[in-house]
Image: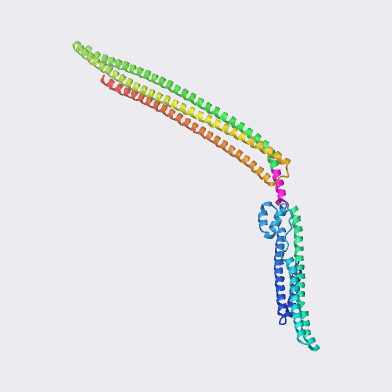
Amino acid sequence: MNIMLFSLPFAVGGAVIAWVGAGFVGSDALALAFTGLIALVFAIGLVELVRFRRDTRLFAEALAQVPDSPEQAEPWLASLPPALYQALHKRLDGQPAALPAPSLSPYLTGLLVMLGLLGTFAGMIVTLSGAAAALDGSTDLASIRGALAAPIAGLSLAFGTSIAGVAASAMLGLAATLCRRERVLVSRRLDQLVRTVLHPLSAQYQRQQAFEALAIQSRALPEMTTALASTTDSLSRLGQQLERSLLDNQAGFYQQFHETQQRFQDSLQHTTAEQLQTLARSVADTLDQVVSRTAAQAGEAIQPVVASAMTQLKDDTSTALGVLQNETGAVARELRAERERIATQENAMLAERQRLFEAMDAALEAHHGRSEQQHQAVDALIARTSDTLASATQRFQSVLAEQSQRLTGLSEEITGSSQEVGALSDAFNAALEQFTNAHANICQSLSAVQNALDQAGQRHDEQLAYYVAQAREVLDLTVSAQQDVLGALKRDQPATSGAR
């Protein structure tokens, strides 16, 4: 509505009130007071209609900027005038609610007329009282005519308050009618938007969406049940595969360790026997060479002196035989001492190997015990996982059956209240939350199984590395001892040869 058309009634009413009031200035104080009261009431009506029209204008501007998505509806609703928010909210809920109209203007319109009549009646009382007093105080016709002229002239002014009241009431009523017409046009625009753009914000649309979501969820529940069953089967198969893999790995590790130990023992015995045989052959060859060289040297020493002196031959022969016997006894004693030392070292090495084998057997028994404990822990964990899955499946199936029954009842009573829909949605969300928690617990259990398997594999690797290091240390000690024996024999051979 044009602001000039809205301002025209107030301008006309104000002009009439000002014209009537100007006529009472200095002549009739009572009529002037009533005219001022009429002007005050007219101003109150003007303020109310100005605020009413401002709210209508803001509401029309808000309807021109309706958001496209429901996510932006809350800020848009917050920007509406408070006087119109409740009416819009009721219309969105499907309740017939009219937009608020001016509350004081209809009352003020009648009040202005009453004030004008009241001013007129008061003026007539004053005028008639003055005429009665003039008639009572004079008997001459001319004086009576003169006395009546002034009150009758003032009687015409007394009706001026009625003119001001009726004119102000008419203009205020016209302005109120124009404002209500503008509000009606905005209300029609609101009705169109509620049926089209604002329909997603209505309670009926939200209930429909909730019903559709529940229908989709009810159709998805069998698929979720099937998926849960397949997940349970997969987890059961995975647990069995993990158990078989753990048992196979342990059996392979035990077999490999026993084979390695047996090969190490066989290799150690074979190497020791070969080295002892080689040592015996070397000692025998050394003795043969010593005897041969001694005999050759003795023959070569005897041949040059055979022709010169037979007497000295006997003495030299006796002396050589004594020396030879002494040297042979010394060599024999050294060989016996060396053999005793070698036997002592061999006994010490055999005792060390025996101790090492006992330690390895103890470690194997401890490892076997830990493996049994790990196997029992894995079995218990798999059993707990299976129980958890079974309980979660049972709870979900019970919740599913309950929700299916409630959905069946809801489909038969589709016209139920929105509170029942909210309760059903909350129950379904609780079921989904229980299923999510069960799935998280299962994932945690599987993670614990995986960690236990990783730790068991790491401990197996560390123990195998320890056993291999111990075996390598024993081999190094054996080879070092044999090298010491061979070095001692090599040192003894030149000393024996020099003595002879």
* Nearer the observer, 296 or 343: 343
The mark tally for this picture is 0
Q: Quadrant of the N terminus?
A: bottom right
Q: Residue at x 75, y 62 (%)?
A: 183
The location of residue 384, given as percent across then percent down, is 55, 32
| 7 w.r.t. 391: above or below | below
* Nearer the observer, 228 or 166: 166
Q: Residue at x 30, y 15 (%)?
A: 292
Looking at the image, which residue sits at the far left? 311
Q: Residue at x 59, y 37 (%)?
A: 438
Magenta range: 198-213
Is 393 inside the magenta-drawn segment?
A: no
* Nearer the observer, 373 or 304: 373
Is 200 inside the magenta-drawn segment?
A: yes
Looking at the image, which residue sits at the far right? 141
Q: Is residue 19 visible?
A: no
Q: Quadrant of the C terminus?
A: top left
Q: Is residue 276 left or right of residue 31?
A: left
Q: Is residue 30 visible?
A: yes
The location of residue 475, given as percent across then percent down, is 40, 26
Give the quadrant of residue 134: bottom right
The dominant secondary structure in magenta is helix
The location of residue 469, given as percent across then percent down, is 42, 29
* Nearer the observer, 388 or 347: 388
| 473 w.r.t. 180: above or below | above
Give the quadrant of residue 105: bottom right
Give the quadrant of residue 415: top right
Q: Is residue 151 left or right of residue 390?
A: right
